[in-house]
Image (tube, rainbow, N blue to C red):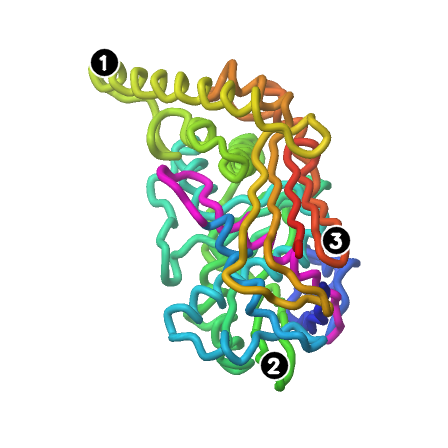
Amino acid sequence: MDRILKVHIDRTTWPNPGIPPLFPKSFKAGLSSYNLNIPAMLMMIGYLTTPTSSTGVSLSEFWAWVRYLAAISNQADLSLTQTYSELDAHQKTILSDDFGMGVPILWLCDKLSLVQIVDGRYFMERIAPMVGVTQRRTAKRGPNKTPDFLARDAAGKWHIIECKGTQSGSEFSEKQLGTKGPPPTGGIAQKCSIRFPPSHTGQRLVCGLSIGVEGRTGSVLKIIDPEPEDPFEVETDQLIYAEDAANRGVISRVLRMSGFEVTAESVASPFGSRPDATRAASARAESARKKMVEERDQKSRREIRSIVGQRLVFDGNFRGREIPIELPREIWVNEEPVRKVILRQGVCREALEELEQKPSVEDLADNKHVSWTQLIGRNVVETDRLSATMRIGDIFRSEIILAP
């Protein structure tokens, strides 16, 4: 189930030749076409909208398949059905935001060999106390909002990514992308908040998806690389903390998607209920903090033992869950009826066994202190006509199947 996506890359927004970040060899300047697999896109939306650090039940990972599968029109270009284009403003905004993340990140995984993808807000909350930052750019809206995502590729380069999506046409999409100013606006302002050492600096991207409607022009993904201003600097000796945040962000999200809710929280926020929690100053408060963490770790161990002993997925080396989702109504895909979606998600057994011994890793989550970080690898998506599989190295596997 593929749809044609138009991709427009404005090379004029990159620095002059020889000045980093260099224009990627895998990018094609100007307008080109990309075959976008819809099950893979929905899988990516579910992955990206699953919270990294939160408590309670989240339906984010199921929302995409139940609601958005029927939103895609049958025309060759990526576009919405007329029915979905007429949703009320609030629902249209949610759909636009979700598509505006899922489409560009799926495309970038293919083009930039991304390994770790972490929420910008979680990244900043986690790294700030470790590098002594007190004025954190963690606003949820406005020019001080952290970028949507940070991603590390297979070569160790860090990419900063801001995503926008709209159904209001190309003119509004351009407005979302923003201007350099002064002052900078839109996505340009929001992705300007972090800078890495030159040898580890990747792309600084703002991605704007203008979503088409059936019977009109298809969707267009535009990508630019504006110059950052007044960024938060990550120094070379602080990269170990950036790696810690990225590793925790990845493992927490895949644990949550696979049904390990408590364990995900233990990894994401090792010192307490928030990612930026640290050891307490007073003995009384520190005692209470330790008690809370130990009680949570005990719950995590029970959770892992319960699931590992029962729920085998894929080749038996993964533990997680398989969920059949009955669609509200039958839809037709490639002239075939689809009545349900089968979703499988699992974490590597080896990683779970290590996490059972040490759920809250108070040391840095790196290769020196925990072995499961070595299992994290490139995000790879494989597609078939009515299915898609996503792998994150050897640590996580997810599959979606459209079934009759």
- According to the picture, the residue beneath numbered tag 2 turns out to be 214
The answer to whether 392 appears left or right of 210 in the picture is: right
Amino acid bearing label 1: Ala
| Mark seen at residue 139 | none
- Mark 3 in CB contact with mark 2 (< 8 angstroms): no
- Mark 2 in CB contact with mark 1 (< 8 angstroms): no
Q: Which residues are magenta?
A: 31-59
Give the residue at x 68% y 66%: 333
Give the residue at x 54% y 58%: 327
- According to the picture, the residue beneath numbered tag 3 turns out to be 383
| Mark seen at residue 283 | 1
Front tag of 2 and 1: 2
Amino acid bearing label 3: Thr
Q: Secondary structure at mark 3?
A: strand
Task: Measuring from the top left, give residue 245's x and y in whole percent.
Answer: 51, 35
Q: Which of marks 2 and 3 precedes in the sequence?
A: 2
Would you say residue 52 sits in the magenta stretch? Answer: yes
Amino acid bearing label 2: Glu
Looking at the rendering, which quadrant does residue 88 occupy? bottom left
Give the spatial CA distance, label 3 vs label 2. Answer: 24 Å
Give the spatial CA distance, label 2 vs label 1. Answer: 63 Å
Q: Which of marks 3 and 1 precedes in the sequence?
A: 1
Does 98 sit above or below residue 238?
Answer: below
